[in-house]
Amino acid sequence: MKLNGYLIIISFLFACDIKKNDDEDTLLPNFDLYTSYFTGKTLDIETSAKGGVCLMGGSSETDNAMRWFLDQSNGGDILVLRTSGSDGYNNYMYKELGVSINSIETLVIKTIEASYDDYLLNKIEKAEGIWFAGGNQWTYVNYWKNTPVDSLINEAIKKRNIVIGGTSAGMAILGEKIFSAEFGSLSSIEALNDPFNGKVSIDSMKYISIPFLNDVITDTHYSERNRYGRHVTMMARLKINGESKGIGLDEKTSICISRDGIASVYGINSAFFIKSNSNPEICISGESLTWNNNEQALSIYEVSASLNGLNSFDLNDWVSGSGGKWYNWFVEDGKLFK
């Protein structure tokens, strides 16, 4: 995470300049529910956001991908949501990247009650871009799912075409299917040895609806933390009941998905787009996973990232791409062959 060196923070202890009707009361933040860090112009403006989604694999941010994210807001207001940390994004987004935006506000949420707070909900309604920081995805699911927060975010995506993005845990909640981490982190060995291990916590109910991420479960810190096996195991669980696709991102690697469904890969490592080709042969409680299909259980398109996002993958057909290579993975008795 980039830290601010000279960030001017306005912690709201006064009424914010929010565009409102004459009869609308000025909204004040509730500091018992969250901490607010604000940078930029306090007068809200409305811009025509250009949509899209930016997924980051964790560790340090991919600067050009973040520039893309900010540009998609079309000079509007950015809202950063997180449940830990502080103001590290404010100066980075507002000044360091050189992309003009009206403002950025980071809200560090302390409790689920914040999901019903008028000030927070108003900020979602006014934002042209929303960014989910890293942290613990279970708190993001527990605090916001089936609350006005996720309803308003989905409405903003659909009706106002805002841009959405997230890194690490913030990326984990943006696929249609989610590893919720309700019972803690999960290693590949634990998952492959028992796909129904209690820590394999998969949330299959829609949360945040992102175009082109239907049937997709994501994972982050992919190569660095050897998460291939746990990701494949979750895909196997999902495949039993329907379609199953995966996107895995290495650290310092991002994909920016435009409105036409093209995922451009930014950074210095790799992005993995994974399709399932069959149902797993053995995927039951207490037994190791076997998903073989003549050693072609999964098709992987691995794309090498570049600083300018020159390589890409088409999420319309999950076939076409540039700058990548296709190969297969399979699992036999709990061992992943890559």
Image (spheres, rainbow, N blue to C red):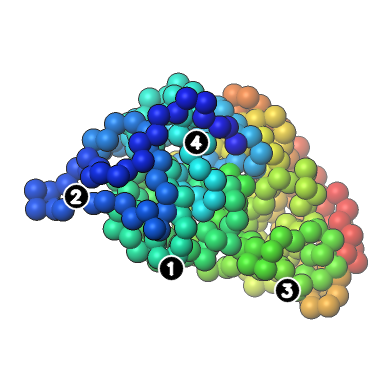
Amino acid of disc 4: Tyr
The residue positioned farthest toward the top in the image shown: 98
Chain-order first, disc 4 or disc 1 = 4
Tell me if I can see residue 320 in this picture: no
SS at mark 4 in the image: helix
CA separation in Å, label 4 and label 1: 27 Å
SS at mark 2 in the image: loop
SS at mark 1 in the image: loop
Q: For the point 43% across and 43% down, which residue is it?
A: 106
Tell me if I can see residue 250 in this picture: yes
Amino acid of disc 1: Asn
The residue that disc 2 covers is 26
Q: Which mark is residue 146?
A: 1
**x and y percentages locating residue 216 in the rendered image:** 60, 56
Q: For the point 50% across and 50% down, which residue is it?
A: 82
The residue that disc 3 covers is 198
The residue that disc 4 covers is 89
| Crowd band around label 4 with a 10 angstrom C-alpha radius: few (<14), some (14–19), many (20+) | many
Chain-order first, disc 1 or disc 3 = 1
